[in-house]
Amino acid sequence: MPNRGLRERVLLVDSQDESRRALQLLLQGCGMEVRAFASAAAAMAETTLDQIRTLLIARELSDGDAIHVLRQLATRGWKGRAILIGQSHAELDEAARDAGFAGVVKKPVGRLELLGALAR
């Protein structure tokens, strides 16, 4: 019998308010626990490593870059899964792969595409 007390923990970072809110509602509707932030600084300051299993982050942020955030998390010992949100799949370039991103979803993010990326 599955443990209903354990929920997927997602850290969502996207500077675009409308996009972030839509993704947060979609993920929560799928039963996930979501901590959403508009900036990399807020996400890094208010999140501990044990609070997240998956990082869902926009490529470009108002105060930084997704690759830099993922590298900071890795330096702190985080070993979760990271998914990049970009304007196109071409944005998952060699630097993003080298940084450790497991997948990419294109904006606007579709429900099936997002859930498929999370399931991998």
Image (cartoon, rainbow, N blue to C red):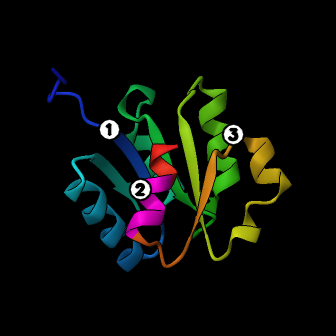
Among the two numbered marks 3 and 2 on one chain, the one whose residue lies closer to the N terminus:
3
Secondary structure of the residue carrying tag 2 is: helix
Q: Residues within 10 Å of mark 3 (few under 14, many from 20)?
A: some
Please state the horizontal and vertical placement of residue 93, each as a whole percent of the image: 81, 59
Instruction: Give the amino acid at mark 1.
Output: Glu
Q: Residues within 10 Å of mark 1 (few under 14, many from 20)?
A: some
- Describe residue 65's horizontal placement relative to residue 90 as left or right: left
Give the quarter of the image for residue 66. Answer: bottom right
Q: Look at the picture and state if 19 lies above or below 59.
A: below
Q: Is 27 one of the magenta-colored residues?
A: no
Secondary structure of the residue carrying tag 3 is: helix
**Residue under numbered circle 1:** 8
- Describe residue 42's horizontal placement relative to residue 40 as left or right: left
**Residue under numbered circle 2:** 115
Tag on residue 105? none
Q: Nearer the viewer, mark 1 or mark 3?
A: 1
Tag on residue 71? 3
Look at the image and give the residue range highlighted in magenta: 111-116
Q: Main secondary structure of the magenta part?
A: helix
Q: Look at the picture and state if 87 lies above or below 14.
A: below
